[in-house]
Image: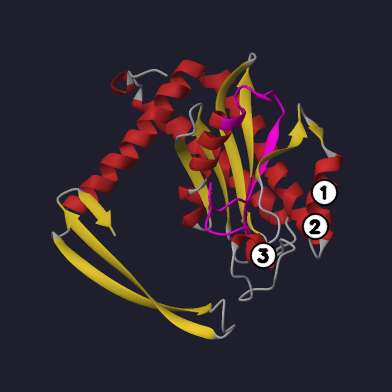
Amino acid sequence: MSKKTNVIDPVRYEMFFHRLWAIGEEGRMTLQRVTASPIVSQGGECMSSFYDDEGNMTLACSGHLRFAAATSDAIRTLIQWFGKSPGFYDGDQFFFNDPYVAGSHTYDMMVIKPIFYRKELIAWTATSTHTADTGGLLRGEAVEIYHEGICISGLKIVERGEFREDVFRTLTGQCRDPQYVGLDLKAMIAGNNVCARRYLGLVEKFGQDFIAAAGEKMIQGSEQKARAKLRSLPNGTWITRQYVTTLDRKSRKAVAQQLFCTMTKKDDELHLD
């Protein structure tokens, strides 16, 4: 990846940034039009996003920013676990909903697609949804992760551009409403296809070296703006307390639990404990 982000033509950079944003929005809207989930189509709890070749997020078009913290972890896990076997090929797409890898619970589903240009992996795109059926126990009844239905860590659902019907039927067949879950899966795949196709159009127009440098500039610019905002705020420590209801494993009765979070802000750094 180019490190010469300080010599990027600012006009071309702005053109690229806004075109990439428009592409991400097109992918997100594609997802929302195809999905079966009202929380996605009407509530907007979904995301379409782009990443560099190492899995660092460059841009996210999200109706729910919580997804932005998860997909980079999933891509890095894919690279670590499956980079050599089975490997990545043009047209592949991978399904994730393992909260121990990425996301906050099994209902947070994502499909990840590598983007190839002239046989080289240059970027990733991903889509995420909240799909309220995993085939597990109903909400509030589970006491361990194995009660929460399917929990998948990078299953290849599209292989070299060919939709894998066996994987699709296996995933949807374990859920209460296969058509509902299946349509959400296809919505994420469709969103990725739109984003990848349009992204390659940008590569043809701007060149891969420019896009790699521009992506790094976007990451650096986001960090600089976030730190500048923190510096404008007073230093201090704040504590919050929330109550949640959990199910006691022995008595099978609802029990109130307290969750504490301490936030410490110093200069341009923020620490949450």
State the quadrant of the N terminus: top left
Q: Position of residue 155 (x, y in %)?
A: 70, 40
Locate residue 32: give its quadrant. Answer: bottom right
Locate residue 253: give its quadrant. Answer: bottom right
The answer to whether 41 is drawn above or below residue 80 in the figure is: below
Prevailing secondary structure class for the magenta stretch in the rendered image: loop
**Residue located 17% across and 51% down the image:** 231
Which range of residues does the magenta coloring cover?
A: 81-110
Q: CA distance from mark 3 to mark 2?
A: 13 Å
Q: Secondary structure at mark 3?
A: helix
Q: CA distance from mark 3 to mark 1?
A: 18 Å
Amino acid at pointer 2? Gln
Q: Pointer 3: residues within 10 angstroms few (<14), some, or many (20+)?
A: some
User: Marks 3 and 1: which is nearer the front?
Assistant: 3
Amino acid at pointer 3? His
107 drawn magenta: yes
Q: Secondary structure at mark 1?
A: helix
Q: Position of residue 195 (x, y in %)?
A: 63, 37
**Residue located 21% across and 68% down the image:** 238
The answer to whether 248 is drawn above or below residue 182 in the figure is: below
Q: Which mark is residue 170?
A: 1
Check if mark 3's residue and mark 2's residue have beta carbons within 8 Å.
no
Check if mark 1's residue and mark 2's residue have beta carbons within 8 Å.
yes
